[in-house]
Amino acid sequence: MSSALTQLASEADCHLNSGCGFPAPGLHTFTFEPLFTVGSVEVNKPMLLSVIAMLAVIGFFAAAFAKPKLIPGKMQLVGEIGYDFVKRAIVLDTIGKKGQKYVPMMVSLFFFVWIMNVMSIIPFAQFPVTSKIAFPAALTLVVWLTYMGLTFKKHGFVGGLKNLCWPSGVPGWVMFLLVPIEFFSNIFVRPFTLAVRLFANMFAGHLLIVMFSLASWYLLTPSLGALYAGTSFVVTIALTAFELLIQFLQAYIFVILASTYVSGALEEAH
Amino acid sequence: MNFLAEAAEAENPLLPAWPELIIGLICFFIVFGFLGKKLLPSIEKVLSERRDAIEGGLERAEEAQAEAQRTLEQYRAELAEARHEAARITEHAREQGAALITEMREEGQRQRDAIVTAGHAQIEADRKQATAVLRHDVGALATELASRIVGESLQDSARQSGIIDRFLDELEAKASVSEGAAK
């Protein structure tokens, strides 16, 4: 059933008034047949794109920072701007001075997520890797292990639990309500929302772009439909530009939240 | 049923596929490894070097300024001391000169006094001598004259009786009295 739908979506000759219905995008848009296998692992498009994103991030930073100079070249300057943005505007701003230790992790997270998002509008790639929940989930797992580990490492087991579910400045009788909520929120809801926020934004964005580009193609007939096709195409362009913003924003939000969680773990007991 | 369940599972977008999750983790750790171990530390080092270079330049400039300030202070202090020294020397010279002048003046005074005293003594001695000679001569002349008038030699008796001397003393006393009155 899945493969049948995929086939339908990619069918090129389906147009308005040609007898076939609109090949609406859906979950099948996010399902890929394996491209090739490495050993026993079947590699599909998102996996390949994630590897390409990895290579792109490493390649860029290697080109920028491999031979750093006191007076930076163009590449180094761009790299420094990116690095400085994550370092100052996100990490040091959220965690403070002791956040210096977590700058490399956050920089890696930010650029890896961002480039995986940007894959959405790169020609031929045209798929945001993070719209597969596995990738946000993997990164969230790293963030979750980091802030949980830091919490228990810094405060001990009891102190760590207290840090996770004992809010400060609240009258005692509210604790009955608040402690379970905090516990649930900090341990389960945080990672879930962190992963799903990124995933759902990219998922929806990709769905919209696919929807309008398919519609442009589907409506492109020598009839009044061509007008709709034109409109649809303009919307596709606009959505692509909008997605460019969203891709950056989601990477930014992901990293700023990760920094906030790390900052919360490092906070002194109140 | 099995097929349907499988299809539903495959299409649930909230269930991560294990291979993708693992690939994602591996990719992230490779990125993190390259960036965290090598590239970011090296750029951080260069950034801090740059900060040092800029701040170091400022520091060096400040140091140079402080050095110049110190030299200026030192120079001023030395100048003030030199002025003070010069003033002290001038004052000393002036004092010494004044002392010398006073001393010379005293010496002059002393010499003048000595000369005057010696002159007085000489004059007194001359006068005494002249008086003695004069007394003798006047006595002799008077006696001679009296002898001629009286016609006999009065020399011996006159001398023996000390008339002449008494007479002359009286004269002298009168002269000194008149002299004192004149004064």
Image (spheres, rainbow, N blue to C red):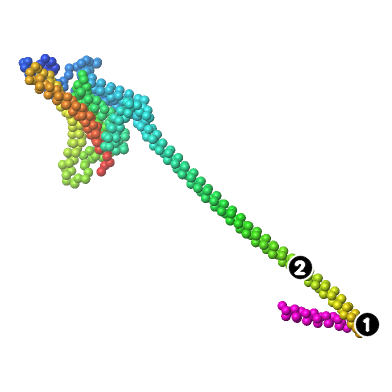
Seen from this angle, which residue lies furthest front? B149
Query: Is residue B67 shown above or below A36?
Result: below
Q: Quadrant of the C terminus of chain A?
A: top left
Residue identified by numbered label 2: B119
Residue that lies at the very extreme toward the right in this rendered image = B152
Query: Residue A84 is drawn in which quadrant?
Result: top left
Is B144 in the magenta?
A: no
Query: Where is A17 relative to A130, above or below?
Result: above
Q: Position of residue A207 (x, y in %)?
A: 14, 24
In the image, taking residue B53 as reference, residue A43 lies left or right, namely left
Q: Main secondary structure of the magenta part?
A: helix
Q: Amino acid at mark 1?
A: Ser
Q: Circle 2 — which element?
A: helix
> Is B130 in front, or is A66?
B130
Work out whether residue A218 or residue A9 is closer to the camera in this orientation and state it. A218
Q: Answer yes or no: do the residues labelled 2 and 1 have beta carbons within 8 Å?
A: no
Chain of the residue displaying label 1: B
**Which residue corresponds to the image point at 76% horizontal and 79% vertical from the top-left?**
B176
What mark, if any, has residue B153 been given in the picture?
A: 1
Give the residue type at disc 2.
Answer: Gly
The reply to whether residue A265 is visible in this rendering is: no
Q: What percent of the width, then of the height, locates residue A56?
A: 27, 23
Q: Which contiguous range is marked in magenta? A: B154-183
Quarter location, residue A9: top left
Instruction: Farthest residue to the bottom: give it.
Output: B150
